[in-house]
Amino acid sequence: GENVEQHPSTLSVQEGDSAVIKCTYSDSASNYFPWYKQELGKGPQLIIDIRSNVGEKKDQRIAVTLNKTAKHFSLHITETQPEDSAVYFCAASRGYKLSFGAGTTVTVRA
Amino acid sequence: DSGVTQTPKHLITATGQRVTLRCSPRSGDLSVYWYQQSLDQGLQFLIHYYNGEERAKGNILERFSAQQFPDLHSELNLSSLELGDSALYFCASSPRPGTTQYNEQFFGPGTRLTVL
């Protein structure tokens, strides 16, 4: 089955700085890579996703890049704000089943 | 708010008992997925239903079962509960095939199960 590894497990950044989270996947047939943000006491919220026919996607302060050859993808958050503090999960799938990374706890220091 | 609803929010029960968790997908979505989130296992896929039919199984124990009803709501039944079943259980739904977002999954707020 698909195995997704996510790094780092925790990330502390100064407000206004950038945050980068990296994930690798094992199944070369995976073609959909979403990122979720989970705040305390809430369910995961889809914040951005990328499909295997695209190398990069951007939505305001958030961007995701995908390197299919190396089987890794990354989330970039620029100009971080206190409300960006949360747990972020990457995932990969080639159908309907999502395989999740272990999560990254991001803390934005004021 | 994702549009996916789950009840109850919290559930406290004893070992050996049986509970039922309920999920209503977003309006128009035919697929429902169940996930378990525990501290040591992360988010684990349990099962996927599409329009009332089971489509895929993940790491779901035999003591657990699910179904999706004609009105598309789904229930996850957990029986002979053990301490290790304590976790957050999430339901997600996705748009129907044929749409460009067909494999996007939208999660509900979850049910926190505590087994004492």
Image (cartoon, rainbow, N blue to C red):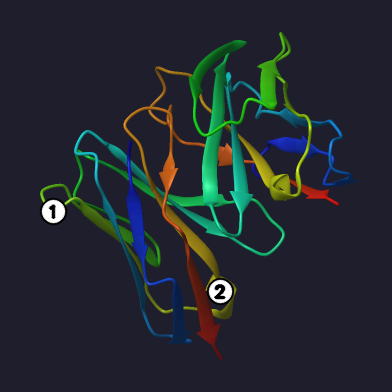
Could you tell me which chain the residue with mark 1 belongs to? Answer: A
Q: In this orientation, which residue lies closer to the viewer: A79 or B68?
A: B68
Asked if badge 2 and badge 1 are on a common chain, one would say: yes
Residue B85 location in percent, x, y? 71, 45
Is residue A104 visible in this depiction of the protein?
Answer: yes
Q: Residue at x 56, y 27 (%)?
A: B47
User: Going by the image, does B90 lie left or right of A71?
Assistant: right
Separation (CA) of disc 2 from disc 1: 29 Å
Quarter of the image where one finds residue B27 = top right
Q: Residue at x 40, y 63 (%)?
A: A60
Amino acid type assigned to the residue bearing label 1 in the image:
Ala
- Closer to the chain start, of discs 2 and 1, is 1
Quarter of the image where one finds residue A31 = top left
Q: Residue at x 22, y 40 (%)?
A: A52
Tell me the number on the disc at residue A70: 1
Q: Quick check: A13 above or below A71?
A: below
Q: Secondary structure at mark 1?
A: loop
Density class for disc 1 (Cα within 10 Å; few <14, some 14-19, many ≥20) is few
Residue A67 location in percent, x, y? 16, 53
Amino acid type assigned to the residue bearing label 2 in the image:
Ser
User: Going by the image, does B50 lie left or right of A102?
Assistant: right
Give the labeled residue for mark 2.
A85
